[in-house]
């Protein structure tokens, strides 16, 4: 059935699930099933992964999808805003080049005028010296000065015009780079279609699901609460950037932390068999080649040379690239594009048949270069088969090996008296290819996709004609689209932002946005509101005076919901006033974490220490180190505050070293608190009224036997 006769169904993007990298998009299309059941659903992006396309019928169990395939259509594109931006950039580039050319010519003129010097006339040896008139020197100097003044004035104007053009070009280039990639970037618009085969009748709605690269996201939040309240509202937002080639307008967006390219294959346990070795069973989709396949094209090859038009001959001569290889020489690779896959030489010595063929064929042997005149049934020398070797040469090699399709000798084309053609000289020995694996071939999944296999005709090489090969050609345009889309993964993150895979840890989470959103395909960050989450919180002040004599404000957050809160930036708003932007740590369901708000200048702390050293024991064989600590707090705020003061005492693993504490501090309980404390941490919890002060006294005594002297001397802080 021709593609023009296949009905087209327009589709609309309905939902998108953005993963850590990449996205899964869902499109909906509606229509009436045609009699033959084949329809073309348009609107798919050029950067989509063809292997990820799935289709199903929504809400009607009587109709089902039996086949879905991807096809690419090309048609002239209408000039739009994207094309106008490109034309503006090209116009400014031409204008910049013209101004730079005028400026270069003007600089050359200025250099010529600057180098003007008076040149005295040549004189003979017997001629007397002549005086140079001063008026001539002054006239030349005035001319140079006037000329340079005029030229420098024009140069200043050109410099100003060049700066203006460069500024406009920079702005236009920025607008062009930030524009949506949904519009085509060339005069020919390529459209990806999904060809569906439906089994059933009636009006149905079809859902297409496919994966695209070029989409990333990072969590962001906004916390709002009141002073003295024990709860707050956390607005979960996401920074989303995508360059998939289609604008997400009014779609349902979901965010996931999973890896879209994670492995999904299951491990297989092989059987252990004791006894004689048995051949591995062949794949169920493989069949032996039919008998007599080599004789199928004998009459086609014996028909003589194919007539060609003059235009075709010129095209072949223009595009043909000879294979630079002599008899007995090693294979020389064909020239190929930068970044392309390496091109294999045609029919290497001892190489097995092309992979993927359903019917096998004879293994080609070493052959000399083929004759220049093409045979009837052989293609012109210009086109190359998928492997990269010219078809005519590979076909001639197969003929020389198998004997099928050789041209009949003609008396008119051979000189009289000429004997039989000379024997083919042997090819010099080269690297021996590995022997083919015994047993039936093991085709891949693409080679077992029978609907995508193409029967090679008589114009193909001898090893391919009459056999089935995967017909999906390599699409460099789609690869380039996917490469451009993947560049969004290198986009710099916003401040305090963390990649979802890093903050989620070993768990995967999904978040569904409460309302449809718009995200254009411009590769920049856009904010999407996901949901509003209630959180429990309390304000505490923390200070570690032994490290820094400063009090820090903190928020102790508790997550009572069933979904995790990933690490990211949070905008803190207190009593409708913006406070600051902080970094929210990852908060698991039911977890409690502390978030810093920065120094609190309204609460002051001072720490003083005193150390005394003495001896004890019957023979003064014990060193006593008495440490005393005094911490003073002052609350300058107009509200009461709760301050947590952290100190640290030494820890020892020596049984002879004794430590005695003299303070009312407590050992923190890590199971109940939001933080994990280091060994030896001690905590004071102080409630200060508005304008109040407090003094905390503590200390500890270390008793060290004389035999337990410190290595390197008695060095203590």
Image (cartoon, helix red, strand yellow):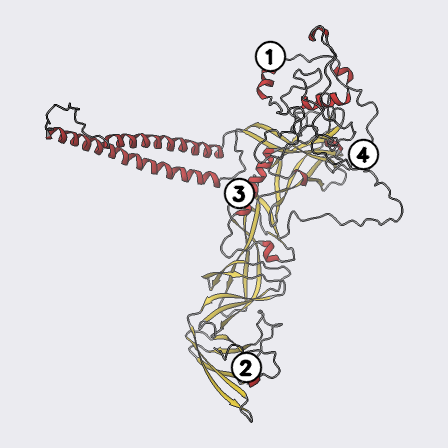
Q: Residue at x 30, y 34 (%)?
A: 158
Tell me the CA gap for discs 2 and 3.
70 Å
Q: Which residue is mark 1?
A: 310
Q: Name which residue lies at 53% across and 55% down.
A: 497
Q: Position of residue 351 (x, y in %)?
A: 73, 32
Residue at the disc numbered 4: 286
Residue 412 visible within the image: yes
* CA gap, disc 2 and disc 4: 82 Å
- Residue 682 picture location, percent across and down: 55, 77
| Labels 4, 3: front one | 4
Identify the residue at the far front of this view. 126
Comparing 665 with 457, the one in front is 457
CA distance for labels 1 and 4: 44 Å
Q: What residue did someone put label 2 on?
A: 709
Query: How far, Cα to Cα, is label 2 from label 1?
Result: 103 Å
Mark 1 or 3 closer to N-term? 1
Cα distance in 3D space between marks 1 and 3: 51 Å
Compared to 323, does 208 lie above or below? below
Percent x, y for residue 426? 72, 24
Residue 191 in the figure: left or right of residue 116: right
Disc nearer the start of the sequence (1/4): 4
Q: CA distance from mark 4 to mark 3?
A: 47 Å
Residue at numbered disc 3: 520
**Viewer-nearest of labels 1 and 3?**
1
- 407, 707: nearer the viewer: 707
């Amino acid at each position: 059935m021709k593609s023009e006769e296949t009905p087209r169904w327009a589709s609309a993007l309905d939902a998108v699930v953005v993963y850590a990298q990449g996205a899964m998009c869902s499109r909906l299309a509606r229509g009436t099933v045609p009699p033959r059941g084949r329809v073309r659903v348009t609107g798919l992006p050029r950067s989509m992964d063809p292997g990820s396309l799935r289709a199903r019928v929504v809400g009607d169990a009587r109709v089902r999808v039996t086949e879905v395939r991807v096809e690419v259509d090309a048609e002239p594109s209408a000039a739009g805003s994207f094309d106008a931006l490109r034309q503006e950039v090209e116009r400014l580039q031409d204008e910049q080049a013209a101004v730079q050319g005028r400026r270069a010519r003007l600089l050359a003129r200025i250099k010529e005028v600057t180098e003007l010097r008076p040149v005295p006339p040549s004189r003979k040896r017997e001629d007397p010296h002549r005086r140079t008139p001063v008026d001539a020197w002054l006239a030349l100097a005035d001319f140079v000065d006037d000329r340079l003044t005029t030229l420098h004035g024009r140069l200043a104007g050109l410099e100003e015009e060049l700066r203006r053009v460069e500024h406009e070009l920079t702005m236009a280039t920025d607008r062009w780079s930030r524009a949506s990639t949904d519009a085509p970037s060339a005069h020919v618009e390529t459209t990806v279609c999904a060809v569906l085969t439906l089994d059933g009748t009636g009006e149905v709605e079809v859902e297409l699901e496919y994966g695209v690269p070029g989409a990333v996201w990072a969590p962001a939040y906004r916390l709002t609460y009141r002073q003295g309240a024990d709860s707050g509202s956390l607005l979960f937002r996401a920074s989303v950037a995508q360059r998939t080639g289609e604008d997400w307008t009014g779609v349902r967006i979901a965010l996931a932390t999973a890896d879209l390219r994670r492995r999904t294959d299951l491990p297989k346990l092989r059987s252990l068999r004791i006894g004689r070795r048995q051949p591995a069973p062949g794949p169920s989709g493989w069949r032996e080649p039919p008998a007599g396949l080599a004789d199928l094209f004998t009459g086609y090859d014996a028909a003589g040379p194919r007539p060609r038009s003059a235009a075709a001959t010129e095209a072949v001569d223009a595009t043909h690239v000879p294979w630079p290889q002599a008899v007995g020489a090693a294979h020389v690779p064909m020239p190929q594009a930068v970044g392309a896959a390496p091109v294999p030489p045609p029919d290497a010595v001892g190489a097995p048949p092309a992979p993927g063929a359903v019917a096998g064929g004879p293994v080609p042997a070493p052959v000399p270069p083929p004759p220049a005149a093409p045979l009837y049934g052989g293609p012109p020398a210009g086109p190359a088969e998928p492997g990269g070797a010219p078809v005519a040469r590979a076909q001639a090699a197969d003929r020389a090996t198998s004997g099928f399709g050789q041209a009949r000798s003609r008396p008119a084309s051979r000189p009289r008296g000429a004997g039989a053609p000379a024997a083919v000289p042997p090819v010099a020995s080269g690297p021996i290819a590995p022997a083919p694996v015994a047993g039936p071939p093991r085709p891949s999944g693409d080679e077992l996709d029978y609907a995508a296999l193409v029967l090679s005709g008589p114009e193909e090489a001898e090893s391919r004609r009459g056999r089935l090969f995967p017909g999906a050609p390599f699409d460099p345009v789609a690869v380039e689209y996917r490469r451009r889309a993947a560049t969004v993964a290198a986009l710099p993150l916003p401040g305090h932002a963390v990649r979802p895979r890093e903050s989620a840890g070993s768990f995967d989470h999904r978040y569904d946005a409460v309302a449809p959103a718009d995200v254009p395909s411009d590769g920049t960050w856009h904010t999407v509101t996901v949901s509003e989450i209630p959180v429990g919180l309390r304000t505490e002040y923390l200070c570690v005076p032994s490290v820094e004599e400063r009090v820090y404000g903190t928020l102790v957050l508790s997550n009572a919901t069933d979904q995790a809160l990933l690490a990211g930036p949070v905008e803190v708003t207190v009593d409708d006033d913006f406070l600051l932007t902080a970094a929210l740590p990852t908060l698991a369901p039911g977890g409690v974490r502390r978030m810093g708000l920065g120094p609190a200048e309204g609460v002051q702390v001072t720490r003083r220490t005193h150390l005394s050293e003495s001896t004890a024991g019957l023979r003064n064989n014990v060193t006593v180190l008495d440490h005393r600590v005094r911490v003073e707090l002052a609350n300058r705020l107009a509200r009461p505050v709760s301050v947590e003061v952290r100190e640290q005492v030494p820890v020892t693993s020596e049984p002879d070293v004794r430590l005695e504490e003299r303070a009312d501090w407590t050992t923190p309980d890590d199971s109940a608190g939001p933080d994990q404390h280091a060994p030896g941490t001690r905590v004071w919890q102080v409630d200060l009224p508005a304008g109040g002060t407090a003094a905390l006294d503590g200390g500890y005594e270390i008793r060290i036997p004389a035999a337990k002297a410190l290595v390197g001397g008695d060095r203590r802080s």
